Amino acid sequence: MKKSKDDYAELVNLFAEFREIIKPVVVEGVPDFTPLAMEKQYTDLLQLQERLETIDISSRCIAQQIDYHVVKAEMNGVDFDHRILKPWARDPGFYNLTDGIYPRLLVHHSRSLSNWGLYNPELPLSEEGVVDFQVKLLAVPKLFAQAKINLIEVAGDLATIAVRVKGKDIQLLKGFAVQFAKFHPELVPHVEQAISATEDFRDWLMANKNKWTAPAGVGKENYNWWMKNVHLIPYTWDEFHTMIQSEYARAITFLKLEEHKNRDLPDFTLTSSEEENSLRQRETAAQIMQFLREKEIVSVPEDLPPLPPEQYPRMWGKSAYLRPNYRGYFEETNDREPMTNVLHVIFGHYYVGGRKIWYQEGDTRPIRGEVRLFDIHEARSEALAFGIEEWLLQAGLFDKRPRSKEIAYIWLAFRTARALSDLRMHNNEYRLEDGLKNFSEGIPYPWADVDSDAVWWDIEETLRAPGHSSNYIKGKHMMQQLIADRSRQLGKNFTFQQFFDDFMSNGIIPISLTCWELTGNRKL
């Protein structure tokens, strides 16, 4: 195919068109995912991919070449969605009231392109808010009616997950009924209709799920295509498995060494209330920020505001959505020692040079500044949050709290056990129940049983989004290789502060593209 003249402006325009064509048409509050609508979207996508192939930006700077690969990877993701994942036809959980529909393409973190989902509102609602909520509630029966028609290739394990999720949707709606009775009684009949429609859809799933025997995993060949062409990860399933299995063994070994070293120390002191635990987390956050400044790990503005209270994990109730007073994995680990998880949140997901990063606030670049589809940045963002836990442990952050290192290695085991379930479920050697069991039993202590929310949520996420869990480990290894490459390039001029400042300013993109931009070495 003949290339046009190098034209970055054309790339930016094409990207904007692409983001528009993948937005579903919404009729009376209901997004259209019927076969005809999906066929049109795929045809439009193929035409855009053809146009993308005509753009030649090889003479442009590395940054603009990288933007080209970001656009291509996202288009590949939508292509894979149509050819393999087909969530509108295979996954009943796609029709999720709390996540919304379009955000499924963003899997699942961003809602910046759609406000369809139902969330606990701040009451009383404004006049506009009442109208918006009424439209959403009226759409629920229509949404599920459409879903029953669209779901023609259902994977049995995805139906099982959806049944559990519908239970949470019903509970959420019943909560709305109670709240609206006081503030907006005119909405209560619409809530009751939505509850009835959701119960009916759940019952329909339960009645049919035993006949839906198709596997949920995409298979090794498809998994490799997805990781190479969408997430731009230059490894195969077999290489992932070897890497992650080795990392799991290291986690257990280092945990046992820490436990042996600390065998004469007092046991962990548990908190007795939400308030006490919140105070412990805030004190931990302050210690982290002081360490980052004093050790010059990353540039931290002096006027950086403290982490808002809602960003700290709740220790009472997080895992108790359907199980009152249940203490799950998050409670058990964070209550004993919050250092690892607070560090993960602060460094990995909240602060970058003084701004919130998860939704890329402040990045105005036309392609880089958009939230990535399919979490193709995950092996960069989650890997950073995951990797920094052990990197700062080695830098001395945990030294005054020696038992905190044990929790760090328990978290490492948690994430590697979860990643092994990811790989084996998508290779179809595990079904859902096997993935749940392997994950739960891979955690060193019985703090996350098979039926816990911590286990279910992560397995649900990784079964619906290939690579979600394995990206943490693969990305961490690629980041460590990047550190090694930069230290070799810069020699005695290498500093972690400059490294992380450069890394953060690169934007939220696939990790292989970050490595290319920072080192000049292309490995795609």
Image (cartoon, rainbow, N blue to C red):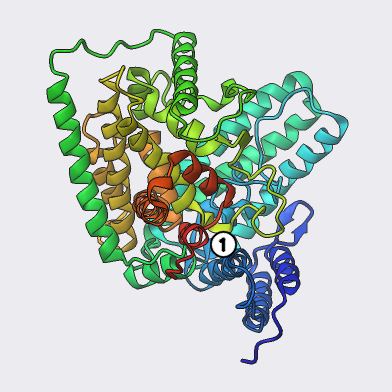
Q: At 63% from the left edge and 67% from the top edge, which residue is drawn?
A: 64
Element on which disc 1 rests: helix
Pick the residue in front: 409 or 214: 409
Q: Position of residue 377 (x, y in %)?
A: 51, 54
Q: Mark 1 points at which residue?
A: 88
What percent of the width, then of the height, locates residue 196? Answer: 62, 40
Image point 32% across, 50% down: which residue?
419
Residue 226 percent across, percent down from the top left = 44, 67
Q: Which residue is drawn at 30% across and 65% down?
A: 237
Q: Quadrant of the C terminus?
A: bottom left
User: Residue 399, relative to residue 353: is it above or below?
Assistant: above
Please tell me which residue lies in front, 353 or 510: 353
* 220 left or right of 266 in image: right
Which residue lies most toward the front here? Answer: 492
Amino acid residing under circle 1: Trp
Q: Quadrant of residue 386 in the image?
A: top left
In the drawing, does residue 321 fall left or right of residue 415? right
In the rendered structure, the answer to whether residue 126 lies left or right of residue 269 reads right
Q: Can residue 41 be seen in this view?
A: yes
Rendered residue at 59%/55% (across/down): 372
Q: Residue furthest bottom?
A: 2
